[in-house]
Image (spheres, coloured by chain):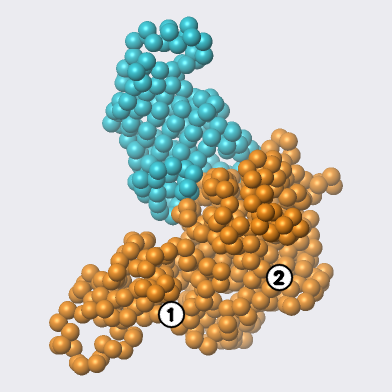
Amino acid sequence: MSAYNNEHFRNLVLPDRVHRSIYIDPQIFEIELDKIFGRTWVFVGHDSQVPNAGDYYCTSIGRQPIVLSRGEHGKVHVLYNRCGHRGAKVLSGVRGNQRIFTCMYHGWGFHPDGSRAGVPMLRDFPTGLLDDPQFGMAPLARVENYRGFVFACQDPSVMPLKEYLGEAIRGIDEMVDRAPDGEVEFWAGCHRYTFRGNWKLQMDNMADTYHPAACHASTVGPDGRQFQRRAGAEGGAAPFFAPNGEAVVSQLGVRGFRNGHSSEQSLFDKEQRGGDIEEYRAIMVAKFGEERTAEIMKNRRHSLTLFPTTDILMAQTSVRIVKPIAVDLTEVEIWPVRLKGAPEKISNDLVKFVNITHSASSFIQTDDLEAFERCQQGLQTQGTDWVLLARGIGAEIDEGNGVMFGPRSSEVGMRAKHQMWRDLMCA
Amino acid sequence: MSTATLMKQATQPALTIEVLRDFIEHEAELLDEQRFDDWAALFSEDAVYWAPAARDQANWLNHVSLFYDDKHTMKTRIQRLNHPMIHCQDPRSTCVRVLSNFKLEWVAEDGSEYRVRSKFLMLEDRPGAERRFFGGRLTHTLRRSDNGLQIVLKKVALTNCDQAFPMLTQPF
């Protein structure tokens, strides 16, 4: 393991490039599971996935099965999905409701907060031994809920969630503020797609406004516009090319945030209007006034990505969760959200459009997946060790509070992610 | 559709399962041959091509779907499938669909609409990618029109519809 010391990791991430081994080396992936996914705040799920006491939702962090659950007093818990006795995964399937989570192996039962509820023939165990919480379903060290978004961290010494998110917390605010009732729900299931590639390829892509002209050329119709990707008569389909021949999206900027978060500017210049949007907008105006509504509905960002693996998709009003499975295998979930208090038609349209933008069969995602898999293959080659992130380097504008803006599809967002990666891997 | 046409249809003998099966097998053949424009032409203007993403999914409004294409979306999908820069089809997939167990589930009283169930298996090969195998139940709602049969709804219920998928480029 001597090759994998701090100096080694420092040399893998340079200001304008990263070493290909961070995408293809299985040993680096193993270290990431500990140093990245074991030590940062990871988005686990939304509290609307477990609305009632006894509800549970099974998910994972790296290879570890975990459970999001709702306790008797309404509190949301995040537990390791493992019996404190012999280690069997307690809850199978995806979701359900049980007053007591019961292990199928020896019948041990646990409350939704992970504490012991019952053990068959308890008196034959040493007295008091099983009172230790680690012999229940152990909770993750830290759990915080921000406006329904539940994050967990396995490291008890991690900084508070709000400090970790910094300015990037606005991504959650901007999405939740679009709900007339100030709350969103995960309500329509999720898309799940996989690719034979490293998880960071997907994360890099979310701070990449440079690729669409080539990668997504097939999404541009004869009228020069990309297909309509969200509802409404205005602000649904954007012209793809500027008069000078450059892709409009690539003329837009990217932001890199402290702690590895990033965001992309919106490709829409017009507010969504027309059709059912007007009814929704009227509800917003009645509640918040015209000025504040215009502020909320403004197209600020295409997406905002939280390090390490969460993406707030503003353009599609959805949340993306990236799950590393192996060094060259990644699973991704896309959850369209419901804006509580908005007309049902609005939420139905969000579901409809995300089917064609981000599902496994969608017009956009399929070519991204092709790109990720080709990267994983191309990065096996030994002619060049470096992967460039040099676009726009030196042209960043410091906006304060740890935010760097890079115009014209700058790779500043990717640089922010990889610098955070390096700092964590060296810690 | 004129009253005369409707009257004419009402007096026509109902279509047999053999005729309906031939039509559905022809549809699968067009997909195997990647004649996507001809395939789309089989669908009525109000048609929906739907592959749910959950077992027992009631509709496409309040749950995500693997595919939910109205005619407009279907045309956009095909425009892209025919586009020279669709990278995820370079190289292209080759598919074969095998259909079986046809059952006539429902006929409208006037013989103008039919619902047919069948089972299918589909093999997809693409150079450089792992061989892929899909299977499930198909439900076709077909309408008799002046131009012959049209698909009003094609529902594809995959056995693994609620799992994670690598890219899906080929309609089932």
Horizontal placement of A202 versus A274: left or right? left
Three-letter amino acid code of the residue under disc 1: Leu
Horizontal placement of A288 versus A190: left or right? right
Would you place residue A247 above or below residue A184 in this image? above
Letter of the cyan chain: B
The answer to whether dots 1 and 2 both sit on one chain is yes
Furthest toward the right, the residue is A244
Would you place residue A19 above or below residue B52 in this image? below
Seen from the viewer's position, the closer of residues B57 and B140 is B57
Could you tell me which residue is drawn at 78 percent across and 66 percent down?
A: A406
Crowdedness near tag 1: few (<14), some (14–19) or many (≥20) residues, C-alpha within 10 Å: some
Letter of the orange chain: A
Q: Quadrant of residue A206?
A: bottom right
Residue A426 position in % (x across, y down): 59, 85
Crowdedness near tag 2: few (<14), some (14–19) or many (≥20) residues, C-alpha within 10 Å: many
Would you place residue A229 above or below residue A90 in this image? above
Residue A84 position in % (x across, y down): 29, 81
Mark 2 lies on residue: A256
Mark 1 lies on residue: A140
Seen from the viewer's position, the closer of residues A253 and A422 is A253
Q: Secondary structure at mark 2?
A: strand
Q: Chain of mark 1?
A: A
Residue A286 position in % (x across, y down): 67, 54
Whether residue B167 is visible:
no
Image mark count: 2
Disc 1 to disc 2, C-alpha distance: 29 Å
Could you tell me which residue is drawn at 19 percent across and 75 percent down?
A: A106
Seen from the viewer's position, the closer of residues A264 and A275 is A275
